Image (cartoon, grey):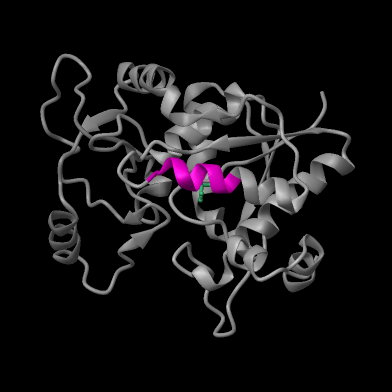
């Protein structure tokens, strides 16, 4: 089977040099392997995604010389598939409703073991407050958490698989869609390395194939800080407006 790579941005702001590095790395790995390259729009968070950011993603990528298979898959069209995956996890007895706020989690987590790590790759490590509560008969539309095995409980905690007002979460959607799109190779930044064990665990539970994961170095600013979407100074759009060429971008990011 030919390699299938993907780039999966969220249209929540302008792409920056870090995205350029990520997409060019994935695109070139696909090309080198005579494989295919897909673009997927991760727009499950309607409160943060904007059509104008999506339009800019297409423009920036085309300008960088990236080509992708069309039509592009948008996660906002995939909610029934995510609910079906959640339903099978629910049927296995692995999910439970949880409406704890960040403040609730912080105060519960602080109490027993002062000084312990509170953050995992999924944010604050959930202390399991709602784990043992009585379950409703049917899977509710409230936020849901996944019971993680003992080995993960101290470093990751029970992850959210369905968020408020989304009906899904980043981890669940990514895993369902990588399988749906037959992705064989996932190329993404080191910042997501901590999410990979979560994704592999979900794949095992859902009986999905496990792609090969490659985590690349991150592009940092002069203070060593990882670039963020609010760093407009390093947005691809800004470089384009200033008359840079795609070749200039490659030079800046060391490609
Ligand atoms: N949508 C994620 C982001 O923009 C990337 C997902 C992934 O590569 O797994 O950070």
- From this viewpoint, which residue is outermost toward the bottom? 223
- Residue 37 percent across, percent down from the top left: 74, 35
In this image, 201 relative to 165: left or right? right
- Quadrant housing residue 191: bottom right
In this image, 197 relative to 158: left or right? right
Count every numbered label the image shows and give the total: 0
Give me the residue at 26% from left, 51% from top. Answer: 126
- Residue 217 percent across, percent down from the top left: 67, 65
Give 83 or 152, whichever is nearer the viewer.
83
Q: Quadrant of the N terminus?
A: top right
Q: Visible in this render: residue 214?
A: no
Compared to 220, does 241 lie above or below? above
- Residue 103 percent across, percent down from the top left: 14, 59
Q: Visible in this render: residue 15?
A: yes
Give 122 or 233, whichever is nearer the viewer.
233
Compared to 77, does 247 lie above or below? below
Range covered by the magenta-colored residues: 49-57
Compared to 161, does 236 lie above or below? below
- Residue 39 percent across, percent down from the top left: 63, 36
Compared to 138, does 189 lie above or below? below
Q: Quadrant of the C terminus?
A: bottom right
Give me the residue at 33% from left, 38% from top. Answer: 46
Q: Main secondary structure of the magenta part?
A: helix
Residue 153 covered by magenta stretch: no
In this image, 244 relative to 59: left or right? right
Residue 51 covered by magenta stretch: yes
């Amino acid at each position: 089977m030919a390699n299938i790579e993907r780039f999966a941005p969220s249209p929540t702001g302008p792409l920056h040099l870090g995205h350029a590095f990520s997409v060019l790395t994935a695109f070139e790995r696909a090309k080198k392997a005579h494989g295919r390259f897909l673009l997927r729009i991760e727009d499950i968070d309607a409160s943060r995604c904007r059509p104008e950011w999506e339009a800019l993603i297409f423009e920036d990528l085309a300008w960088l010389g990236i080509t992708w298979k069309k039509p592009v898959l948008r996660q906002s069209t995939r909610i029934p598939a995510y609910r079906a995956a959640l339903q099978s996890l629910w049927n296995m007895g692995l999910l439970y409703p949880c409406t704890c706020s960040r403040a609730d989690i912080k105060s519960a987590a602080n109490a027993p073991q002062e000084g312990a790590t509170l953050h995992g790759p999924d944010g604050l490590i959930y202390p399991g407050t709602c784990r043992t509560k009585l379950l409703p008969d049917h899977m509710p539309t409230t936020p849901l958490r996944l019971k993680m095995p003992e080995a993960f409980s101290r470093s990751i905690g029970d992850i959210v698989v369905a968020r408020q007002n989304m009906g899904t979460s980043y981890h669940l959607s990514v895993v369902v869609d990588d399988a749906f799109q037959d992705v064989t190779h996932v190329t993404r930044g080191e910042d997501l390395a901590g999410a990979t064990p979560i994704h592999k665990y979900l794949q095992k539970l859902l009986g999905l194939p496990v792609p090969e994961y490659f985590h690349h170095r991150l592009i940092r600013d002069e203070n060593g800080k990882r670039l963020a979407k609010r760093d407009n100074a390093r947005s691809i759009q800004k470089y384009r407006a200033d008359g840079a060429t795609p070749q200039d971008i490659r030079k800046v990011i060391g490609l």
